[in-house]
Amino acid sequence: MFEINGGAAVHVISLSKHFGGAAVLDNINFEVAQGEIVVLLGASGSGKTTILRIIAGLEMPDTGRILLHGKEVTELPARERGTGVIFQSYALFPKMTVAKNIGYGLRLRGRSRKDIRKKIDELIELVHLEEHRDKYPAQLSGGQQQRVAIARALAYEPEVLLFDEPFGALDAQIRTRLRKEIRELLKKINVPSIFITHDQEEALELADRIAVLNKGMIEQIATPFDVYMHPETEYVATFLGAANIIPGYIDHRCFRCEDISIDLDDEMRFSNGQAASLVVRPEDVFLRKPENLIQKYQPLTDGIVDEVSFVGAFERVSVRLAFIHDKRMIVTRPKTETAAFPLTIGQKVPVGVVRFRVLPDNNREPVQRSSSAAKR
Amino acid sequence: MSANVSGVKHTRGFDVIKPLSVSVLIAIMLPLVLLPLASIFVFGTSNGLTSFWNALVAPEAIFALKLSFATSFWAMIFNVIFGLFAAYVLSRYAFWGRNAIIVMISIPTAIPTAVAGFALLLLWGPYGLLGRYLPPDMQIMFTPYAIILANIFVTFPLAFGVIMPVLETMSRSLEEASATMGASRWQTFWYVTLPSLRGAIVGGALLTFARAVGEFGSTILVSGNLAGRTQTAPLYIFSKFNEGQVEAANAVAVVLALFSFVIFSVLFFARDWLEAD
């Protein structure tokens, strides 16, 4: 009935949901291609769990549609959708062995004992749980339980795998290792997958594409590289990685804030007087005059070193900018830089950036050119 | 100096509190619980095992024990199924009046058993609210069915009370996982929910059964206490004692006491086994 081209495995079309007058989801649209991993990244309350539950059929949207491999499933109950959900706590059946958990979906589908056995063997090998076949979930570690949950969902060849914060219950070291393992596994079996998480590092590492959610809306959906390097909104810039935000306005293809003036590329289209923010990652700030920098360098202003702290691989510097009262910029410098140009507190330094984004700020009203000058 | 200190072995004075407190515990229990129970066994077998055995196999005694177990069994079956159903409905759905229903289910434990029996008489007795409409050959009071009814009433919330908390704390995601994997509600209940309730169901059943076997207050009112027809084991003990046949009463008392002991041992020790995977 609904012909959607591209043959994507999952289509989420203008999903909206309200709860007690407040919008939980507001016009959510995205697709997942066969074998693609999409991560829904957002703070708690951003609506990401609701999206997952709607796709799985555990919740109903107010409006919008879900298509799985081109088939409309919006009205279907969970059991007829064929999704594989990996719950946050894994939800393994405590009274069934590993093998029985994995075979459950096939048993429900009335497959023969022989078929079920064969499939269980295959999956147990895939997730490396050979020695744990006859154990009960309570006897397994968190990572092993998670692998059972994945194998259990894969057994009946699901239309899509849905992961609900799957690493939340594991400790940090295991988490990093499992992320790699799971990404490799998913790429091998080529199943479309949707993860939800609030952990930006997890999202960057796992995803083919990241959808950043904020207050029930998708702020940006793009590859991890693009989301990090070319954030489209201030929220995305600050949620993924750290960012210095300098509020200003647009003035004839220039970004202005006090005595800062930056020429903008032609392709960045803003209206005159529009409120905008200069967004700079800490690693893109430069605290000395460029001598032979290959990257393009944009001087901003002068600053005074406020604080220098050593954080592992980097040095973190806080610089008080000269032009705005109490405005500080956070800068990270690699070891090569700190060795060659050591900084002391109170030192006056030139502040410049090698990479930046200017983003429209829709929360502030457009600024009259004169009002800004009058502030000083 | 410090070298010597490391070689000194720590000794702690004899802790008198521990043996003392255990002794006090036993001393309190002795006259209140242990001695009464012991005297049943002492008196029951004081005239020799043969006379104990003869008292036990008296037709009326055998009948009373059988009747007690049979009526308790059916009350148990009913209350476990009802308790499971009620716990499932009340833990899975939120609706107006839910708490009122929970309170109503629990009320029978708070009502004196004699009042419960009296209430049943007022409803089902020959002149009762509903009983008056029953034809004479279908009267249920003063029959074994009345005993089952009374047992159901007084043990009504026991199985529910054991099953409900287990169902309420069970993670909803287990059932959701089952549904996303393709299970119908019934399949989810049968394969996922019920196995997790195994311990609670057995526990609730034993509790109901044990309580029903010992029921006296309501039974004596609704049964009519007819020896060989509607006389349960506790009524038999009461009647024989009143008639001065202490030995006959004692024999049945021994059986009931042993029975409770077995039930609660099973409850205590089988719990781990039932809860274990």
Image: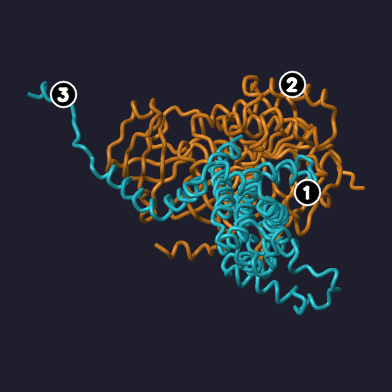
Chain colours: A orange, B cyan
- The residues bearing labels 2 and 1 have C-alpha atoms spaced at a distance of 29 Å
In the picture of the structure, the residue carrying the numbered disc 3 is B6
Q: Chain of mark 1?
A: B
Residue B201 seen by the camera:
yes
Q: Is residue A133 above or below residue B220?
A: above
Q: Chain of mark 3?
A: B
Camera-side residue: B157 or A265? B157
From the viewer's perspective, is A266 left or right of A32?
A: left
From the viewer's perspective, is A92 left or right of B127?
A: left
- The residues bearing labels 1 and 3 have C-alpha atoms spaced at a distance of 67 Å
Label 3 in the same subunit as label 2: no
Q: Quadrant of residue A7?
A: top right
Q: Is residue B10 above or below residue A55?
A: above
Q: Amino acid at mark 2?
A: Glu
Nearer mark to the viewer, of 3 and 2: 3
Q: Is residue A177 above or below residue A262?
A: above
Q: Residue at x 38, y 30 (%)?
A: A312
Label 2 in the same subunit as label 1: no
In the picture of the structure, the residue carrying the numbered disc 2 is A122
Q: Residues within 10 Å of mark 3 (few under 14, many from 20)?
A: few
Q: Residue B6, image x and y in percent? A: 15, 23
Camera-side residue: A37 or A366? A37
From the viewer's perspective, is A86 left or right of B2?
A: right
Callout 1–callout 3 Cβ contact below 8 Å: no
Q: Amino acid at mark 3?
A: Ser
Q: Amino acid at mark 1?
A: Arg
Label 1 in the same subunit as label 3: yes
In the picture of the structure, the residue carrying the numbered disc 1 is B185
